[in-house]
């Protein structure tokens, strides 16, 4: 809608790559490096997504998924939540089948790629070999005269990580990411689980609008009132805006990664739609079983 008041929103980033090439290490480094003093002692809980504020005030949201399975699942459900993909390749290894798969996923989704050539602190690291392997796949990096940004990093020592984030932010600035915070929230589910004490919990990512405690929420075939929300530092929050991830309590089930959520006027309306969806899923399930 052209008449909407659109404000700049932080980019949503997914790190993808071959097993053991350093996805988790990179996310851990970024998170630790950006923990605000005073919160350092706080136990962070894994909520599948988190945001960081850099020293200059710029924000980035990271999707901390177990791998590109979640990215694929979300894409399959039409949820295009990632703005920029970091493809990480270990410089002491090679471009591997899962690296190529990750590149193909990002390309198919039309998501810009920044390459992180990791583990350059290792003696066996050979970043130029990785660049040549990427060139063979037609992904020529900038310092080889191509169009893809790349950065040599060590997720262990932190070397090159802030330069990598600068490149990711440069890429996302070109996308001109904006959203209207002043309306009812819509967004996507990142992951869900059943927590003994708290019941069903879902990590959701707000795409536009603002989600408030008390809102009537509908996510996939489930609904409820937002009872409480927590960030990844386990702090309660009352409202969350565009590109912000949050753990939501109050749904009556566990929607899947990639399910869309929205908010409605009445719980009755939400229940009706949820029931219809649930019935549809059950019918489709039965149909699958019969074959
Ligand atoms: P999966 O989630 O299992 O696919 O692996 P991953 O991509 O998350 O890799 P992870 O971060 O678990 O790193 C794998 C191993 O490489 C761990 O032992 C890390 O400590 C090590 N590692 C990651 N990054 C670096 C780095 O920059 N330098 C060195 N020396 N080791 C690293
Ligand atoms: Na690993
Ligand atoms: Mg990992």
Image (cartoon, rainbow, N blue to C red):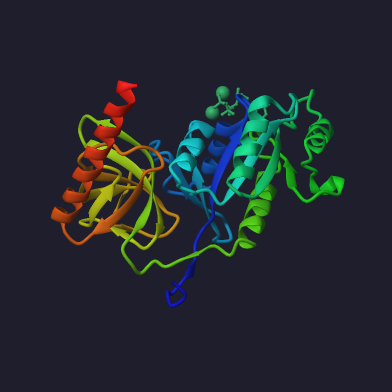
* Residue at the extreme right: 145
> Front-most of 156 and 107?
107
Tell me the quarter of the picture where residue 11 sits: bottom right
Query: Could one spot residue 236 in this view of the protein?
Result: yes
Residue 54, position as x, y percentages in the image:
56, 55
Q: Which residue is drawn at 66% across and 58% down?
A: 170
Tell me the quarter of the picture where residue 18 sits: top right
* Residue at the extreme left: 268
> Front-most of 187 and 201?
187
> Front-most of 157 and 167?
167
Q: In this rendering, is residue 252 above or below 56?
A: above
Residue 194, position as x, y percentages in the image:
26, 31
Residue 32, position as x, y percentages in the image:
52, 41
Query: Could one spot residue 33 in this view of the protein?
Result: no
Q: Which residue is drawn at 80% across and 33% down?
A: 127
Residue 250, position as x, y percentages in the image:
21, 45
Q: In this view, does 152 lie to the left or right of 198?
A: right
Q: Which residue is drawn at 75% across and 32% down?
A: 120
Q: Residue at x 26, y 50 (%)?
A: 218
Could you tell me how many numbered marks the image carries? 0
**Placement of the C terminus among the 4 image quadrants:** top left
**Placement of the N terminus among the 4 image quadrants:** bottom left
Ligand 3 location (quadrant): top right
* Residue at the extreme bottom: 3
Tell me the quarter of the picture where residue 284 sits: top left
Q: In this rendering, is residue 19 above or below 6?
A: above
Q: Is residue 146 left or right of residue 187?
A: right
Q: In this rendering, is residue 226 above or below 256?
A: below
Q: In this view, does 249 lie to the left or right of 240?
A: left
């Amino acid at each position: 809608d052209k008449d909407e008041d659109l404000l700049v929103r932080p980019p949503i980033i997914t790190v993808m790559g071959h097993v053991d090439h350093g996805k988790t290490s990179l996310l851990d480094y970024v998170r630790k490096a950006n923990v605000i003093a005073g919160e350092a002692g706080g136990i962070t809980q894994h909520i599948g997504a988190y945001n960081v504020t850099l020293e200059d005030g710029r924000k980035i949201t990271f999707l901390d998924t177990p791998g590109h399975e979640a990215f694929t699942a979300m894409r399959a459900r039409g949820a295009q939540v990632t703005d920029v993909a970091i493809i990480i390749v270990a410089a002491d290894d090679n471009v591997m089948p899962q690296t190529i798969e990750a590149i193909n996923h990002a390309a198919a989704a039309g998501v810009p790629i920044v390459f992180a050539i990791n583990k350059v602190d290792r003696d066996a690291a050979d970043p130029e070999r990785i660049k040549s392997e990427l060139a063979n796949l037609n992904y020529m990096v900038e310092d080889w005269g191509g169009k893809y940004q790349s950065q040599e990093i060590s997720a262990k020592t932190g070397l090159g990580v802030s330069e990598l984030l600068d490149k990711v932010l440069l890429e996302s600035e070109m996308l001109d990411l904006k959203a209207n915070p002043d309306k009812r929230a819509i967004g996507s589910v990142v992951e869900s689980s059943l927590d003994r004490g708290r019941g069903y919990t879902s990590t959701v990512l707000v795409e536009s609008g603002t989600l408030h405690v008390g809102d009537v929420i509908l996510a996939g075939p489930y609904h409820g009132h937002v009872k409480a929300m927590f960030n990844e530092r386990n702090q309660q929050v009352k409202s969350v805006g565009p590109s912000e991830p949050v753990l939501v309590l109050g749904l009556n089930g566990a929607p899947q990664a990639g399910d869309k959520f929205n908010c409605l006027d009445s719980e009755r309306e939400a229940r009706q739609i949820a029931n219809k969806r649930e019935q549809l899923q059950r019918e489709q399930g039965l149909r699958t079983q019969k074959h």
